[in-house]
Image (cartoon, helix red, strand yellow):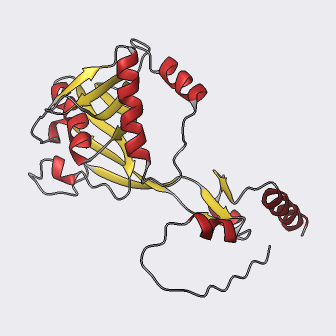
Amino acid sequence: GAMKEIYRKCFQKMQKNGQYLSHLYPFEENYYRRYGYDVSCQGAKWEIPVEKLSMKKSGKNVYYDGSEEMKQDIKNVFDIFSKDKNMMILFDENAWEKFFEEHAPFSGLNSYVHYNDAEEPDGFMSYSPKDNGDLPQNMVVDRIWYKNIAGLKGSLSYFLTQKPYCDKLIVDLPCGVDISAFINSTGGWGKRDCQRIVKNYGLSRVIDVEKILEIAKIQGDGCVTIKIKDDQ
């Protein structure tokens, strides 16, 4: 009873402070469901042998040099990428400053901007190599943002140049993005050498239903009656 009362008081305080959504990265999901939380964001981790990548290269990937021009190109790609994604962390100027410090040239993260055939930025990707025992290194993608599927494809095409030097590409993508078309299906898709693992990225709970409904982007016309029961 004590925890339930603590949460009830917390929810009241959040609503009073104008907070209409609460998000957690919990140690155990089922425990927090009793307080109204549930999965609100998922992603998919892809593990692909680099030799299985099969795509036609287009445009070019340019190493991030720290210039103001490339910083603006990265911001531009992020702005488009983040518009239709759930639970994105938006960057203010302080966050961008820290991001560019962490992704500075020769910082240990290899960062590339992809430019399409019209010389327009449409993708950004950073990665670092990870030891893989006696096998060649795995390439672990830290960030990947893109304006469209061509930008994603172009960014991933960078790893075609890494086939002699690495074993697997490991990249996290939104669940709704399917890159199986970029993978050579010889031998059949679904073999153990290619994996797609769905991961939960935290739980959310609505604090102020009226506010959520006000800002929701409802498609179509008409009216709806909603009955809400909240035991908290």
Locate residue 50 relative to residue 125 in the image: left or right: left
Specify the farthest residue to the top.
106
Viewer-nearest residue: 141 or 27: 141
Say which residue appears at 49% left-offset and 55% top-offset. Answer: 86
Instruction: Residue at 21%, 22% (x, y): give it.
Output: 165
Where is residue 216 shown, x and y percent of the image? 54, 66
Whether residue 24 can be seen here: yes
Residue 132 visible in the displayed image: no
Name the quarter where the C terminus is drawn: bottom right
Position above or below: 224 against 73? below
* Residue 129 position in % (x across, y down): 35, 24
Residue situated in front as seen by the camera: 17 or 137? 17
Residue at the image point whose x is 33% and y is 32% from the top: 124
Question: What residue is drawn where x is 34% and y is 13%?
Answer: 65
Side of 83 where 165 appears, left or right:
left
Location of residue 210 (image quadrant): bottom right
In-image side of 99 versus 58 (left or right): right
Above or below residue 56? Residue 40 is: below
The answer to which of 83 and 86 lies nearer the viewer is: 83
The vertical placement of 193 against 120, above or below, is: below
Q: Where does residue 206 sit, x and y in percent of width and height?
A: 67, 65
